[in-house]
């Protein structure tokens, strides 16, 4: 349904209310501001809902002497820190004190920068806390006529802080607490009530964009598809609804809300949100269903702000032509059922590169001349270079070319090893001559060929099955999918006790899918790839199969076998199986 701008949404729907956030207000004293400077003191105050929960203070023994000017400014002398704990002792204790808190600092980039660097030096994982900079907040809400600047001393005096900042860590942290509370009261009057609102305000998210965040209120916290729309009029002034952008998520409410936050950095999405007049939702039974519905909607509506998956049907195939001496041809459609096709490729360049790999591997002819099987034709330079079997000359070239065609068909249908092995000698020579860039180009082409082989067979094998019913364990139950000729025909979610019953019901109501021509999937190739990837997810269980879901063992090789075929190495792991059989587990244990 379309989601108009609502009244003020509840805080639970929009984020974490500021009164429920535990802040750790921190201040550091250092030996200076350079890269070689060290922390000399850490002071922090933990607060929540206006109440102080605890304080932390420690001097830190630096690795370098404190400059005289800094000693005068802070009152921290070399003698005071001589017996203080070093950073390896002090920082872990502060990390424990501040764990799970939102960090607050006045001029946060300075203090947080030192803390992050300290974590890196001690090989501690940086927790990536949410950070609030009171300077940034003050610059947003304090008019120039009210305060002359946003220094801590100025703001502390303005808000009547009980502690006067004096360049000592704990004192400055206490003063910053009072400044924080004063600023939070001020932003509350501006409608900023949650931590997310505060972040957006400091990131200068426009009020109009922030107001649209209420559109997420009616979205379910479930997987599904969402699409932003623009309600307008066409050239004849008739009402027209344009779909601007389509997306999917495992949690619709959280995902849609993020479009109106500081986390969204993409300029085109900012423009899309500005143009949008509403957002609509469709809840799905499973995450895979959401993925598939997103693809289908992008293909049918072509939203102007989507970039990916808009050209799902623009594929390129390699075809062995049906003539006296077949050759490779790149085509955009499969129209000849008798010819052998292989792919697909996303671009003509990729298809031509794969064709080059095959031509070099088997000396297949590359010319486009229509040759006669009875009358000889002049050969070309490629034949003289021994890069073509020269069937045009008839004689032995005819037999050699026929063998090359058989090798290409074998590489496409069952065994990719011949192509991979074909460049062993060339790679060896290139490496021996230290021509590593050329060797890298050859290897890249062979790997791309192998990837296309995997892509071809994993989808074709699934598309050959009239029906596959499979289930995968998820939190609270099982995702169940009915797949027909590689297309998602039905989806449901089942509690643990009723998987088989829900699966049977899903089969009954699933979409009827006619058998597609040419052995390709009934839906788009991209949809079939998403479905295949889900089928190969660990934990998937097959409940029913109508057809053989299998593909040739040597059409796609694991990494260890691929390297062995390229380099000629042997390994006891060469007999490892690869392909659908790895997830085709028995379903006897299914409830």
Image: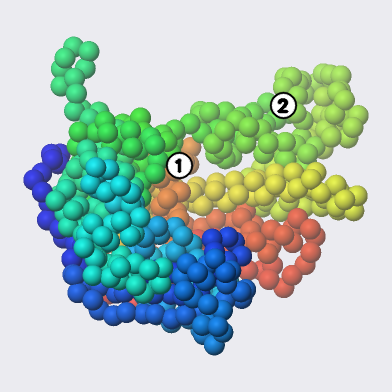
Looking at the image, residue 522 lies above or below residue 82? above
- Element class at badge 2: loop
Looking at the image, residue 236 lies above or below residue 61? above
Left or right: residue 54 versus residue 449 is left
Depth check, front residue: 388 or 129: 129
Q: Which circle marks residue 312 in the picture?
A: none
Residue plotted at (30% across, 56% down): 154
Looking at the image, residue 107 lies above or below residue 68? above
Toward the top, the furthest residue is: 236
Residue plotted at (29% across, 51% down): 138
Residue occupied by mark 1:
525
Residue plotted at (45% across, 54% down): 532
Neighbour tally class for label 1: few under 14, some 14-19, many 20 plus, Cα within 10 Å: many
The quadrant holding residue 131 is: bottom left
Looking at the image, residue 562 lies above or below residue 459? below
Look at discs 1 and 2 and give the one toward the viewer. 1
Which percent across, then down, holds residue 247? 32, 44
Depth check, front residue: 170 or 215: 170
Residue plotted at (26% across, 54% down): 198
Q: In which quarter of the image is the N terminus?
A: top left
Depth check, front residue: 551 or 33: 33
Q: Which circle marks residue 324 in the picture?
A: 2
Which percent across, then down, holds residue 21? 24, 67
- Element class at badge 1: helix
Which percent across, then down, holds residue 310? 41, 34
3D distance between C-alphas at marks 1 and 2? 32 Å
Which percent across, then down, holds residue 12? 16, 60
Residue 223 visible in the picture: no
Toward the bottom, the furthest residue is: 83
């Amino acid at each position: 349904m379309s989601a108009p701008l609502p009244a003020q949404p509840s805080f639970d729907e929009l984020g974490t209310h500021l009164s429920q956030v535990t802040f750790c207000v921190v201040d550091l004293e250092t030996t200076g501001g350079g890269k070689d400077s060290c922390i000399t003191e850490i002071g922090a105050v933990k607060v929540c809902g206006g109440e102080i929960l605890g304080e932390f203070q420690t001097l830190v023994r630096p690795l370098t002497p404190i400059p005289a000017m800094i000693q005068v400014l802070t009152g921290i002398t070399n003698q005071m820190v001589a017996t203080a704990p070093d950073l390896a002792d002090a920082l872990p204790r502060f990390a424990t004190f501040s764990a799970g808190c939102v960090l607050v600092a006045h001029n946060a980039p300075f203090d947080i920068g030192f803390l992050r660097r300290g974590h890196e030096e001690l090989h501690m994982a940086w927790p990536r806390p949410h950070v609030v900079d009171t300077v940034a907040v003050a610059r947003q809400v304090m008019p120039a006529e009210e305060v002359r600047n946003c220094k801590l001393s100025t703001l502390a005096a303005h808000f009547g802080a009980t502690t006067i900042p004096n360049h000592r860590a704990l004192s400055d942290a206490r003063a910053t607490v009072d400044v924080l509370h004063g600023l939070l009261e001020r932003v509350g009057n501006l409608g900023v009530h949650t931590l997310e609102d505060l972040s957006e305000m400091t990131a200068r998210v426009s009020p109009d964009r922030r107001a649209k965040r209420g559109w997420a209120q009616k979205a379910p916290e479930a997987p599904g598809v969402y699409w932003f729309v623009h309600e307008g009029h066409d050239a004849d002034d008739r009402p027209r609804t344009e779909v601007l952008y389509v997306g999917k998520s495992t949690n619709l409410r959280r995902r849609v809300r993020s479009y109106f936050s500081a986390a969204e950095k993409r300029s085109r999405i900012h423009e899309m949100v500005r143009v949008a007049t509403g957002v609509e939702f469709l809840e799905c039974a499973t995450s895979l269903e959401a993925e598939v519905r997103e693809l289908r909607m992008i293909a049918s509506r072509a939203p102007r702000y989507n970039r990916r998956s808009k050209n799902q049907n623009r594929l390129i195939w390699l075809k062995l032509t049906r003539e006296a001496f077949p050759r490779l041809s790149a085509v955009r459609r499969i129209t000849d059922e008798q010819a052998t096709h292989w792919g697909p490729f996303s671009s003509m360049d990729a298809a031509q590169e794969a064709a080059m790999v095959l031509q070099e591997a088997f000396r297949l002819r590359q010319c486009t001349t229509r040759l006669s099987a009875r009358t000889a034709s002049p050969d070309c330079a490629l034949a003289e270079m021994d890069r073509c079997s020269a069937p045009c000359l008839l004689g032995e070239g005819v037999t050699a070319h026929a063998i090359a065609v058989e090798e290409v068909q074998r590489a496409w249908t069952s065994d990719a090893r011949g192509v991979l092995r074909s460049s062993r000698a060339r790679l060896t020579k290139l490496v021996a001559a230290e021509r590593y860039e050329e060797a890298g180009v050859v290897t890249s082409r062979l790997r791309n060929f192998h990837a296309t082989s995997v892509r071809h067979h994993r989808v074709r094998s699934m598309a050959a099955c009239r029906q596959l019913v499979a289930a995968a364990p998820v939190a609270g139950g099982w995702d169940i999918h009915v797949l027909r000729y590689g297309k998602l025909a039905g989806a449901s979610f089942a509690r643990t006790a009723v998987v088989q019953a829900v699966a049977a019901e899903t089969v009954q109501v699933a979409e009827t899918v006619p058998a597609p021509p040419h052995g390709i999937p009934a839906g788009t190739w991209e949809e079939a790839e998403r479905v295949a990837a889900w089928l190969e997810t660990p934990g998937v269980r097959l409940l029913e199969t109508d057809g053989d879901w299998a593909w040739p063992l040597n059409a796609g090789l694991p990494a260890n076998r691929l390297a062995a075929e390229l380099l000629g190495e042997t390994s006891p792991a060469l007999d490892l199986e690869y392909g659908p059989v790895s997830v085709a587990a028995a379903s006897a244990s299914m409830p």
